[in-house]
Image (tube, rainbow, N blue to C red):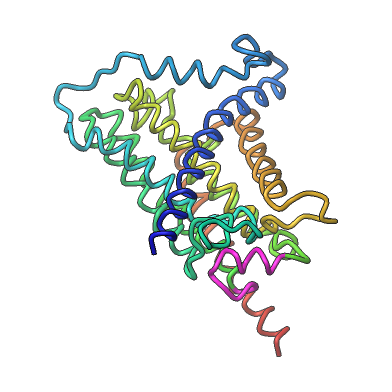
């Protein structure tokens, strides 16, 4: 029992380090890619090729003076960013980066995930649905109308698109016959589910981008209307925690897309180890995130909600029913 706890703690520490590193250099990746797409210079002064820019940003936020409204709810004001970040970190524990290896530590065969629960996707939905509490509490506890409106907007948006997000994954469960993420990846050893379930993959990507409040769905923090939305009254490291949670959620949404639709760690011809294929696919999905932010304008809020309720939700229901009918017909 002690060995299992030690191995789990080691895996958790590795995940925390990997996610923090990914967050830091994802910000650099986004700024460089946006600069190239918009024909301008990106970070290139701090360190070789701008590689030390994330460290410089972190030091700046760490020592930046913070302030908050005098009438804020102090406990909830501090708890909101911590809750958002904790949910983001915990959700990654079920993501399988690769299959089991031959490496043995303390008598246990090491796998590239913390846990392989048989309801892995349901666990993911349960955690991500808690993320809205951190954003809403930030708006409520700040005692600011701009923050409150941003929190309400984000709550409505995340609840609306979460339904389409969940239903878009049901066809994957039907085809794979399992909720366990490792089983779903192994079911794609020959064909990735993104090919036969392409409409579901597109719906998932649209809903996932909206869930993470990224452009063109970044209405909760619309700077032209709400200053900065739910984190208007946050600065320094408290703001950095929200910033960190947003980027880690991008990594998680991209990782789930890789696991559910893009074959996880499986790649053609066996020319690369499994973790490298997983990383390449996640980076490709993250590139789409940045590409959309650099090219598309922000949606109007009523059109944002119409897209979620009148388009994505009916399409995800239709895709779910069509997949069930086809699978039953093939099995007969």
Decide whether residue 24 is among the magenta residues.
no
Residue 205 percent location from the top left of the image: 60, 49
> Residue lying furthest left in this view?
71
> Residue lying furthest front in this view?
106
Residue that appears at 70% across and 86% down? 331
> Residue lying furthest top in this view?
45
Q: Is residue 75 above or below residue 56?
A: below
Of residue 142 and residue 64, the one placed in the foreground of this image is 64
Of residue 306 and residue 278, the one placed in the foreground of this image is 278
Residue that appears at 33% across and 21% down? 235
Mark yes or no: residue 27 visible: yes
Residue 225 percent location from the top left of the image: 40, 26
Q: Quadrant of residue 35?
A: top right
Report the span colored magenta.
174-188
Residue 310 percent location from the top left of the image: 51, 56
Please state if 306 lies on the left or on the right of 38 as rendered.
Answer: left
Residue that appears at 48% across and 66% down? 117
Location of the N terminus by quadrant is: bottom left
Location of the C terminus by quadrant is: bottom right
Decide whether residue 180 is among the magenta residues.
yes
Mark yes or no: residue 319 visible: no
Q: Quadrant of residue 104?
A: bottom right
Residue 19 percent location from the top left of the image: 51, 39
Q: How many marks?
A: 0
Characterize the magenta stretch by its predominant secondary structure: helix
Of residue 328 and residue 306, the one placed in the foreground of this image is 328
Q: Is residue 263 above or below residue 288?
A: below
Q: Is residue 41 above or below residue 87?
A: above
Of residue 207 and residue 35, the one placed in the foreground of this image is 35
Q: Is residue 103 above or below residue 295?
A: below
> Residue lying furthest right in this view?
269
């Amino acid at each position: 029992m002690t060995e299992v706890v030690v191995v789990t703690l080691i895996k958790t520490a590795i995940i925390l380090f990997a996610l923090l590193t990914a967050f830091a250099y994802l910000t650099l990746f986004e700024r460089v890619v946006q600069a190239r797409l918009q024909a301008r210079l990106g970070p290139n002064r701090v360190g070789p090729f701008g590689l030390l820019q994330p460290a410089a940003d972190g030091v700046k936020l760490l020592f930046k003076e913070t302030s908050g409204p005098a009438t804020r709810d102090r406990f909830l004001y501090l708890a909101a960013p911590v809750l958002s970040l904790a949910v983001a970190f915990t959700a990654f524990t079920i993501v399988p980066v690769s299959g089991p290896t031959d490496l043995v530590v303390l008598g246990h065969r090491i796998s590239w995930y913390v846990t392989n629960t048989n309801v892995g996707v349901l666990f993911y939905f349960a955690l991500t649905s808690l993320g809205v509490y951190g954003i809403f509490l930030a708006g409520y506890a700040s005692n600011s109308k701009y923050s409150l409106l941003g929190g309400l907007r984000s709550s409505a948006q995340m609840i609306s698109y979460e339904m389409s997000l969940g239903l878009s994954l049901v066809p994957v469960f039907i085809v794979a016959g399992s909720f366990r993420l490792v089983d779903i990846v192994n079911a794609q050893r020959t064909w990735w589910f993104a090919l036969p379930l392409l409409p579901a993959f597109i719906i998932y990507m649209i809903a996932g981008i909206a869930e993470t409040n990224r452009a063109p769905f970044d209405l909760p923090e619309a700077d032209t209307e709400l200053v900065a939305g739910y984190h208007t009254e946050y600065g320094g490291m408290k703001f950095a925690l929200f910033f960190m949670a947003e980027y880690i959620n991008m990594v998680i949404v991209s990782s789930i897309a890789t696991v559910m639709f893009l074959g996880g760690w499986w790649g053609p011809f066996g020319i690369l180890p499994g973790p490298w294929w997983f990383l390449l696919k996640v980076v490709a999905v993250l590139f789409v995130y940045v590409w959309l932010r650099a090219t598309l304008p922000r949606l109007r809020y009523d059109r944002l909600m119409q897209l979620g309720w009148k388009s994505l939700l009916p399409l995800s229901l239709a895709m779910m029913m069509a997949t069930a009918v086809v699978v039953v017909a093939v099995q007969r």
